[in-house]
Image (cartoon, rainbow, N blue to C red):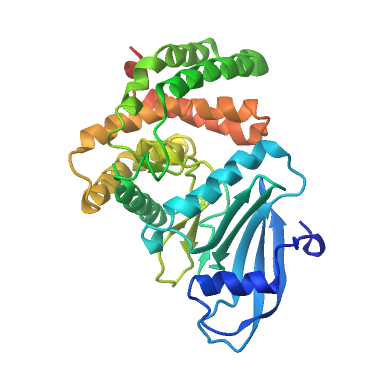
């Protein structure tokens, strides 16, 4: 995204004055001018850092803001994710403890146009991406990340607003449709890979699909559920820079839903970590996560239940490379996911769950 073409018509000094004022971060004065100091395209969005110049205001007014908006060159296929992320910051973020998410000043999605914008506090001076992809974080960093997810999950665990004013429970009809779509996309996956998907692995997929109705009983209970990120790799967060005393902030919520918490953990570890690291750290971090859940007020959910949920989540992570391949994402994304999740499936004896 070039800076010269990155200023939409709605991005004005008046709007940038009103938004912080509504959030009580600008008690007086106004934005006199602004400039987009840096801008770039991500996979599905455009992001930029905005420098603000004020007249007649206090030092408390934000000097920088972070803007996320639509990429000009993408069609309507990506709009669902943008709509979902705007919904997250409008309904989920406000009651969530403030130190788990970046502060959001504006979350707007309009079908007309369409218009999508998120305006955040800028954390560039205090936070950064935790590591260069695909290098995993250090042990200490991983511990903080797992504990951060536990705090977020615990806050929303069986929350009274889940399925009503915040998110919704998936219906039986939707679960049935999901299994049908899984089977359809898997057939395409088989055609794409040919003999690069071994007969043993193909049979594993077929058994998982056949067992899908029974395995989905865990979802149908609508108990011990929370809000899950849905794309919880460790690069979808901002980690405090060295020496900063701030907290980890979770970002990029375009895939959130009400579901089983261990889906996020399985995606983080089983899908993205190679066997040596996963075998060394997996159970240790699950125990750490469980302890943080209990500290966050979750009751009646023992470690054995979490462990079984985690193994079940690993079975469902087999979906990831199938969907990514069918969406025409590059094999540099999904081929490694396929290998790693298959090895996790074997290590954890997930075939026993298929009957």
Nearer-the-camera pick, 72 or 275: 72
Task: State left or right for residue 193 relative to residue 86.
Answer: right
In this rendering, the answer to whether 109 lies above or below 77 is below
Please name the residue shown 71% across and 57% down the image. Answer: 40
Q: Which residue reaches farthest bottom?
A: 56
Q: Can residue 125 be seen in the rendering of this structure? A: no
Nearer-the-camera pick, 275 or 124: 124
In this rendering, the answer to whether 350 lies above or below 58 is above
Task: State left or right for residue 204 relative to residue 351.
Answer: right
Locate residue 332: give its quadrant. Answer: top right
Q: Can residue 241 be seen in the rendering of this structure? A: yes
Nearer-the-camera pick, 92 or 354: 92
Q: Residue 337 placed where, x, y %?
A: 54, 32
The N terminus lies in which quarter of the figure?
A: bottom right
Q: Residue 245 placed where, x, y %?
A: 40, 71
Q: Which residue reaches farthest left?
A: 300
In this rendering, the answer to whether 43 lies above or below 19 is above
Please name the residue shown 47% across and 25% down the image. Answer: 342
Nearer-the-camera pick, 72 or 191: 72
The C terminus lies in which quarter of the figure?
A: top left
Q: Which residue reaches farthest front?
A: 112
Q: Residue 265 placed where, x, y %?
A: 39, 40
Q: Residue 76 placed where, x, y %?
A: 70, 38
Q: How many marks?
A: 0
Locate residue 307: give its quadrant. Answer: top left
């Amino acid at each position: 995204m070039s800076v010269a073409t990155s200023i939409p018509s709605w991005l004005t000094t008046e709007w940038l004055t009103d938004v912080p004022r509504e959030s009580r971060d600008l008690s007086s004065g106004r934005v006199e001018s602004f400039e987009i100091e840096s801008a770039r395209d991500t996979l599905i969005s455009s992001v930029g850092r905005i420098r603000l110049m004020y007249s007649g205001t206090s030092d408390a007014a934000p000097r920088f803001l972070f803007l996320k908006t639509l990429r000009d060159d993408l069609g309507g296929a990506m709009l669902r994710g943008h709509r979902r992320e705007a919904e997250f910051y409008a309904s989920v973020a406000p009651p969530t403890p403030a130190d788990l998410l970046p502060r959001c000043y504006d979350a707007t999605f309009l079908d007309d146009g369409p218009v999508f914008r998120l305006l955040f506090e800028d954390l560039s001076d205090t936070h950064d991406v935790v590591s260069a992809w695909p290098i995993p974080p250090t042990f200490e960093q991983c511990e903080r990340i797992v504990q951060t997810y536990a705090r977020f999950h615990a806050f929303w665990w069986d929350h009274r607003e889940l399925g009503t004013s915040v998110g919704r429970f998936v219906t039986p009809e939707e679960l049935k449709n999901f299994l049908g779509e899984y089977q359809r996309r898997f057939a395409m996956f088989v055609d794409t890979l040919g003999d690069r998907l071994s007969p043993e692995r193909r049979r594993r997929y077929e058994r998982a699909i056949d067992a899908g109705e029974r395995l989905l009983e865990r979802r149908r209970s609508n108990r011990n559920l929370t809000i899950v990120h849905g794309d919880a790799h460790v690069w979808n967060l901002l980690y405090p820079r060295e020496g900063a005393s701030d907290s980890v902030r979770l970002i990029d919520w375009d895939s959130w839903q009400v579901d089983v918490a261990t889906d996020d953990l399985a995606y983080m570890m089983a899908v993205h970590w190679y066997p040596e690291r996963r075998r060394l750290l997996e159970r240790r971090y699950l125990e750490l996560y469980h302890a943080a859940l209990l500290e966050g007020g979750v009751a009646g959910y023992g470690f054995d239940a979490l462990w079984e949920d985690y193994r079940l989540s690993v079975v469902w992570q087999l979906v990831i490379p199938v969907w990514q391949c069918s969406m025409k994402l590059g094999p540099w994304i999904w081929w490694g996911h396929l290998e790693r999740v298959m090895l996790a499936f074997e290590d954890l004896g997930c075939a026993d769950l298929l009957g």
